[in-house]
Amino acid sequence: MSSQKENKKTAKQHKKVTATKRQDREEAVKNETKTARPSRFQLTDFLPTTKREVELRGWDQLDIILFSGDAYIDHPAFGAAVIGRTLEAAGYKVAIVPQPDWHGDFRDFKKLGRPRLYFGISPGAMDSMVNKYTANRRLRSEDAYSPDGRHDLRPEYPSIVYSNILRQLYPDVPIVLGGIEASLRRLTHYDYWKDCLRKSILCDARADMIIYGMGEKQVVRIAQELENGANIKDLKHIPQTVYLCKESDIPEGIKADDIVLHSHESCLHNKKYQAENFKYIEEESNKKHAQRILQAVDNVYAVVNPPYPTMTTEEVDAAYDLPYTREPHPKYRGKTIPAYEMIKHSVNIHRGCFGGCSFCTISAHQGKFISCRSKESILKEVKQVMQMPDFKGYLSDLGGPSANMYGMAGKNLKACEHCKRPSCVNPEICPNLETDHTKLLEIYHAVDELPGIKKSFIGSGVRYDLLLHKSKDEKSNEAARQYTRELITRHVSGRLKVAPEHTSDRVLGLMRKPSFQQFYAFKKIFDRINREENMRQQIIPYFISSHPGCQEEDMAELAVLTKDLDFHLEQVQDFTPTPMTVSTEAWYTGYDPYTLEPIFSAKTPKEKLAQRQFFFWYKPEARRDIERELHRIGRSDLIAKLYDNVPKRHPRAVYDPKAIGSTPDIPNKKRKEERKNQQRIAENLLNKMGNSQRVSIQTFLVTIVADKNKNARRVICHLMTYHLILFVYENEKKVIIVSPNPICI
């Protein structure tokens, strides 16, 4: 760990060090590499990244060269590795250039020469701007997909930067864009970071084609067509691709069943046109049999071909069963790649999500129909994880885009072929949706029975609306109850994360999320099971502020409701407008894309802060501003509910000052014993300070922190019950106690 911290420090000072210091640092890295854990694999087990590695394979020329904005991690969770391995399995000679230097003489773009077929550009697993900036347009603390979290290893908009460099160096070589950045910018889109409406990324990147969504089929098809002598400009028939062409060159011309959107230029002058466009874009993205979409831009048309059919189990298995090493390339030895550390002991079991949340891009990229892996393929990957040297028996996640959608599909598939709903669960769960959790339970049981697996955690988001759904099939209902109990008792690492996102049903409707009443119902079940199993786990909710349609009053009520549940919220965020979501279009245009009704959005820093502050009502420094804001919006009645100990309207929960979630009640006998113990320790602490004297906050704080008793935190809880202090919370290093006056003891 100390070596990793040293690397982080040197990375941050990268631009400031002198030449001598840089040499010292490079020497230190070399020494560190010698002591780092050696890879279990040879260099030739990875896709080549340098000329030397290409020569080690005995290749004279590459067929396809991929440029990636992420570090090269040979793992099925990283897109460049999946595409590279897929092309390799199809018989092509492929190399990856991870995070090329886009400054100076472009040597990283030249080092592997000219490919025989095409260049592929994968900007990264995340949109580059989301990866770099927060919702407030501030630089993030780290780039999770770069070694040691460094920020200086990729440009903004890698799709555009890399493509223009390659076009300059190799003007006649085809360039194909892929990945989430290009996929979600395939048509006119709002760019939050530039605060403007931008045309299809093909126009700025000067590339030949976009592959949108999951790209395994397209990359192989393009390679086959080019190998057979086709010109990239003639590849206008490949599904799930986007290209630019003149109206006269559109295959079969503009047909009656084509969807022709308002032009880019029209959208620049009329925001309502942009909102109206998006309704059709989203609907076609979620249909079994989509129509072709066209949009005029710069005197040509951006043509979006309909997607491939949903991948079969056999096709998904093939993508995951490729010979991944599941490790970062050896060039990163001794360095830490945060995103890899998070997922290295996890296994993805399906693709797709039918939740259709307004602010989410998963269904836009992976589709709403679920593609499941077979049990055999999942178990094969779990066994590979078990062979990793640092695996201790705990799977960090056995999930997918959503934790509990595995094996779910329409009961009547013919009905699904005519459906264009963006969500199968909103506003109500579709009666045609099969919500049986039996197949998922079978996966859990099969994994947990493997020798060497101590516990498999579920880190993906759980859809509690699917667990609460009352189906006409009692077998499904029983499976949901069984899944809920097993999830809570066997697959939670102490904290179960769920995403109600808000408490206002009006705002939740705009988000396409279930009513907050369902969260209450699920929490009640969660608490009951914890009591029955004598467990004290926490439920951790995620919330969003400043979503389109959300007002300050909604956030104030959220603060009151979550306070009543004993939540001290930290898993919160401002809404970030990312390309190609309903919420983003509503935020930019001011209209609901489906109703074209006006919709309010908090946009200025002041408006956003006015909403976000309600998340942290429990922080003493926020109280004055919150009270002022409540007076301003005419909701001063909420002040007493937040700060004057109004009786709670919801079932009592045990308070933990460090918790960001709440824990269930514990049995009365155990609670009484615990309180007596706390009272005893509290009296000892008070005796240390002396009787009948006024003790300042600082003195009291030092005494608590200095005390080495492990029960100090619970003692503070006990003191709270005696109303000696108003607020208590704990950060990573010390306990902080806040009171308006010195405490009289």
Image (tube, rainbow, N blue to C red):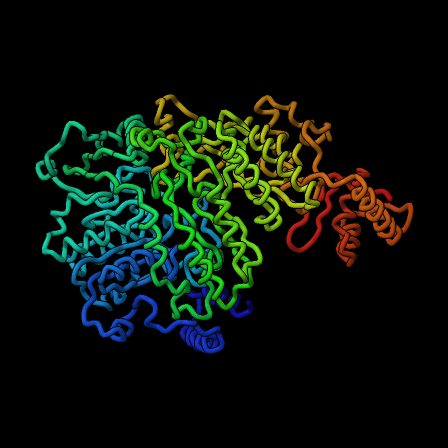
248 over 142 or under it: above or below: above
Q: Quadrant of residue 583?
A: top left
Where residue 221 appears, as percent x and y from the top left, is 20, 51
81 over 693 or under it: above or below: below
Residue at 15 percent across and 44 percent down: it is 236
Residue at 43 percent across and 72 percent down: it is 39
Q: Is residue 435 left or right of residue 237?
A: right
**Does residue 324 appear in this view?**
yes
373 over 199 or under it: above or below: below
Task: State the quadrant of the N terminus.
Answer: bottom right
Q: Is residue 76 left or right of residue 289?
A: right
Foreground of the two, 651 or 583: 651
Foreground of the two, 384 or 327: 384
29 over 174 or under it: above or below: below
Task: State the quadrant of the C terminus.
Answer: top right
Where residue 147 appears, as percent x and y from the top left, is 43, 63
Q: Quadrant of residue 628?
A: top right
Foreground of the two, 723 or 331: 331
Q: Quadrant of residue 721?
A: top right
Q: Is residue 661 left or right of residue 215?
A: right
